[in-house]
Each structure stands twice: as C-alpha cells, then as structure tokens.
Amino acid sequence: MKKNILTGERPTGKMHLGHYFGSLKKRVELQDEYNMYIIIADLQALTDNFDNPDKIRENIKEVVMDNLSVGIDPKKVTIFIQSMIPELAELTMFYSNLVTISRLERNPTIKTELKQKKAIFGNNGESVTYGFLGYPVSQAADITLFDGEVVPVGEDQLPLIEQTREVVRKFNSIYGETFFEPIGLVGDVARVKGLDGNDKMGKSLGNAIYLSDSLEVIDKKIMGAVTDPNKIKKDDPANPNKCMVYYYHKLVNNNHPTVCSECKKGLRGCVACKKELIASMDSFLKPFREKRAFYENNPTLVDEIIKDGTNRARIKAKEKMKEIKKNMKIDYYQ
Ligand code: TRP
C-alpha cells in the first residue's frame, strides 16, 4: 500500500519560483510513489482574507493550474477544495480541545505572521481573530484526516507540521491510535531569494518571478534585479555572491559555472549576463507556460479535475471520520 501525502496551498495568488523549488518540484517527483492529495485551502486563506472573498475565489483555479502546469498529473493526484469537505471543520473542532492558546501564540510561523500583521495594523493585536490564531489546528485536521504521513512544504511551514505532530500524539494518547505523526519534507532549495536580494521570494514582497510570467515580464524583472553594487563598468571584476542574477543562473542555467568565473575576472558585463539569464529562465518556464495555456484554454477540464478530486477526497474523509468518531465515542446511532 502506498503511503499518503497531503500538501497544498492557500489560493491567494499565482505561484512563483519559491513555491516551485520549495515544494512543487518535490510533489512532481513523489506523485508516483505516494498516494497524493493537494488541498486548495480556501478556508485557511479566508482566516486573514475574510473580507476579500473574491480574491480567494478567483485564485482557486490559478493555483490548481499552477500545480498542473509543472507536471502534477490529475489522474494520479487528488486535488480538492478545503471548504467542500465538511469533515475538516468537524475535526478542527475536535482538535481545538487539544491545543492551548499559549502554544498557538508560541508557534514560530504564527509569531512571524502576527508580527507582520501588527506592523500593518499598528495595534497590539486586538484585531487578531480566533480563526487566524487557530489555523494551525485546522491545518492539523487537513493533514491527518487524509492520513498524511509525508507533507512536502516550504521551510516556513515546518512549525505547523510540528504542531500537527503534537496534536496527533495527544489525540492518540487519549482516544487510541488513530493518526500518523506526519513528517515535513522541504525541497532541495529550502528558500528562494527575491529579485531584490531579500531572503524570501514572496507575493506580498513584490520580488517574485511567477511560473506563468511571460518572456516580456521575465525580461523586465531580471533587467531590474539586484547585482553587485561595486561593479560599475562592464569589465569591472565583481562578486557574484552579491548578485541575484548569478543566484538565478545557479537555479535554472546548467552552464552556470562559467558565469561565476567570468564575473570574478571582469569578463562578463551585467547586461549580457542578464540577457543570458533571461533566455535560460524563459526556457525553464516555457514548458510550464505551455501546459498552463492548455488548461487556460480548457477551463471546464480544470473544473472537472477539481470536482472529481473533491468527490474522491470526500469519500476518504467520510471513511476516516467514522473511525475518529468511534474512537472518540461520539458515534451515536450509526
Ligand atoms: N499553510 C499552507 C500555505 O500557507 C496551506 C495549507 C493548508 C497546507 N493546509 C495544509 C499545507 C496542509 C500543507 C498541508 O500555503
């Protein structure tokens, strides 16, 4: 029997290179070996976008198409929408007894996000909702309802996996062996830096290359990428480690070793180097764009993939919920 993987994302925008190297690439590699579920976490997205439901709705298909574009095979992988599985809400409620508020406040992922929110709202967190603070509990439900044993995610998600493991241990110790303790699996490149040199590529940071970016957009973004500020003239020697162009050459250009030595010796001007990267980036992303275009032109096919996946996910969810209720002794009149 194949082991289960559960992974997924919030539908808040299109996916970028950070998502690809952090998690999507691993998914594609593992889709044969594992029984894989991909959750489109609309309810989780609403925890901090509850006042912007259009944004979440509009991005569901975008995120699904991003997954399909990089090679996720909908025949092998079950892609489903979180809010269409009511058992997830039930399990979140059951788990809410097993997690303390102080533990949630100490969760490093939540802590970072709360800091960012306080910076945005400029208050002492009075606007932090119960739903937002509790989203790790809901994520624990996502993973465990589908018997997820392995969770390919970006590095920032590891504290959420740890939180899930704690919930599982507590649940199993009280109600008997019911769930696996999942392990998080981070891609070979844990974190992809942004075009501006920021440690993290992020939607909200405006420093991302999206998987669906056109050649024109890639061109513009790479021409504006951060390079070694000490290199003024095109034949000045420079430090490639201070240069985002070199950084992306390493990610997507197999011939990158010459880039480094030529740059250090002043044999490579930044404009030529950027042009070369634009070409490499474009050939790297082109197959994704082409596959995406196929689905964009067949929107009902994408709907079918989501509906079919959600139906399959509901069958699994119902089955697991029976076992959970039995173990919790709330399986009345069944
Ligand atoms: N928290 C993830 C994100 O921000 C989305 C997500 C929801 C998820 N449920 C999950 C990821 C379960 C892995 C497993 O994108």
Image (tube, grey):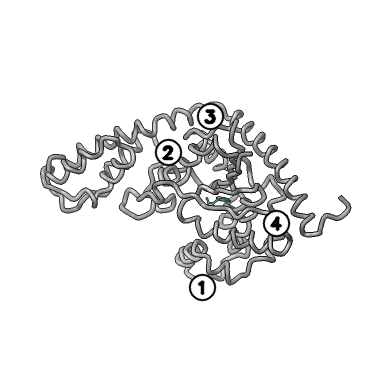
Mark toward the viewer: 3 or 4: 4
- Between the residue at mark 1 and the residue at mark 2, the CA separation in whole angstroms equals 37 Å
Q: Residues within 10 Å of mark 2 (few under 14, many from 20)?
A: many
x then y, percent, for residue 277: 28, 37
- Between the residue at mark 4 and the residue at mark 2, the CA separation in whole angstroms equals 41 Å
The residue carrying mark 3 is 295
Foreground residue among 215 and 164: 164
**Label of residue 96 in the image:** none
The residue carrying mark 1 is 124
Rendered residue at 30%/34% (across/down): 280
- SS for dot 3: helix
The residue carrying mark 2 is 211
The residue carrying mark 4 is 177
Quarter of the N terminus within the rendering: top right
For the question of whether residue 153 can be seen, the reply is yes
Q: Which mark sits nearer the N-terminus, 3 or 4?
A: 4
Mark toward the viewer: 4 or 2: 4
Q: Which mark sits nearer the N-terminus, 1 or 4?
A: 1
- Between the residue at mark 3 and the residue at mark 4, the CA separation in whole angstroms equals 42 Å
The amino acid type found where label 2 is placed reads: Leu
Q: Is residue 236 left or right of residue 119?
A: left
- How many marks can you see? 4
Residue 49 location, quadrant:
bottom right
Rendered residue at 64%/37% (across/down): 309
Q: Vertical placement of 263 versus 52: above or below?
A: above
Q: Which mark sits nearer the N-terminus, 4 or 2?
A: 4
The amino acid type found where label 4 is placed reads: Glu
Q: Are marks 4 and 2 in contact (CB under 8 Å)?
A: no
For the question of whether residue 55 can be seen, the reply is no
Q: Is mark 3 within 8 Å of ligand 1?
A: no
